[in-house]
Image (cartoon, rainbow, N blue to C red):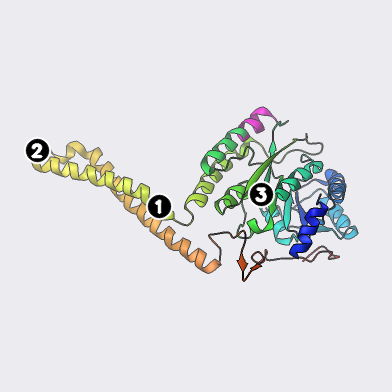
Amino acid sequence: METSEQSAAREAAGSAPTTYSVVVPIFNERDSIEELYARIVAVMTREARPFEIVFVSDGSRDGSDELLEQIAQADARVVYLRLRRNFGQATALQAGFDHAGGDVFICMDGDLQHDPDEIPLFLAKIDEGFDIVSGWRVSRSDHLISRRLPSRVANWLLAKASGVALHDFGTTFKAYRREVLQDVRIYGDMHRFIPVICARLGATIAEVPISNVPRAFGTSNYGIGRTFRVAMDILTMRFMTAYVTRPLHFFGKWGLVGGVAGISILLGLFLLKIFSGVPMEQHGPLMELGSLLSVMGVMMLATGLLGEFMARIYFDNSGARTYAIRTAIRSGRRLPPPARLPIKPGWGDESGHA
């Protein structure tokens, strides 16, 4: 809770109180919605924080939409978004971010496996100045083979590949400052990599231990079948975070290795033929390998150059920034943060929609 000293300092700085948006993607969670809503309201009211709840129905088919609409009509603090079909959790979160009006986003699942009573843990870290606060399910109640073991391996690989020392990338229970998401668009299954993408732009990240409450209603939408997708996402994440602004450094490196190796093999065979008279037919497989490596080297270099052109076209035409500003002061005045996300609903809007 904000202290009187913090309030006085904020008033002296001439800034409004921080507002909070609790973003909850919903997919067939009718049985848990009312309890989840009541507990979020109770926690945020107890914390005395200006807040809204953004429910995003991601193609639910169990009657969740009717219940969410009733709640949104009865409570102006609730924003209700109904997507036309099931687009996936990442897209649902992006829709929630686009329509949220808060300065801080708190994301959590709609199945009550995330305890709303733990929201103050995230708020405390945000108050300390961190840009992102990620939950860490220290003790998980999920099945060992289908959930816990693959998750542990994936988290270890993600930490090594990204250089971001998080124990739990997979949980949705996270808090973000709005400004760190200004230039981030999430899609596919990339929501678990938001801290990695933001860390590349200098975001500060904290981790808090959270409980993993056993699911009381319905069945999980995830299982061991998503292991392959996670593996592919790790490769995508590694490339996007390390080489998105310099693809030639990635492709060119391997292109040069392959090209030099191929040319060396072919040159050696040529000299062997000239000075020893050994028939080329005796080294057919080696000559084919040299030719293949040479061609692959040229192709990798060409791919890297094309990637460089595409990266420049993307950043020049989209206006996306390759940097992030934490503080800017001009003429002795602190400048406001960059423009917010595209859709900015007003606080207290009766309909809850932009």
Residue at 32% x, 45% y is: 257
Residue 217 vertical position relative to residue 97 in the rendered view, above or below: above
As measured in the structure, the alpha-carbon distance from the residue carrying label 1 to the one carrying label 2 is 40 Å
Residue 184 position in % (x across, y down) = 61, 57
**How many marks on residues?**
3
As measured in the structure, the alpha-carbon distance from the residue carrying label 3 to the one carrying label 1 is 29 Å
Residue at 73% x, 65% y is: 344
Q: Which residue is mark 3?
A: 132
Residue 147 position in % (x across, y down) = 66, 33
Residue 88 vertical position relative to residue 280 in the rendered view, above or below: below
Residue 69 position in % (x across, y down) = 85, 57
**Residue range highlighted in magenta:** 142-151
Q: Secondary structure at mark 3?
A: strand
| 313 sits left or right of 342 in the view | left
Q: Which residue is mark 1?
A: 249
Whether pointer 1 and pointer 2 mark residues with C-beta atoms closer than 8 Å, the reply is no
As measured in the structure, the alpha-carbon distance from the residue carrying label 3 to the one carrying label 2 is 67 Å
* 16 vs 112, nearest the viewer: 16
In front: label 1 or label 2: 1
| 132 sits left or right of 160 in the view | right
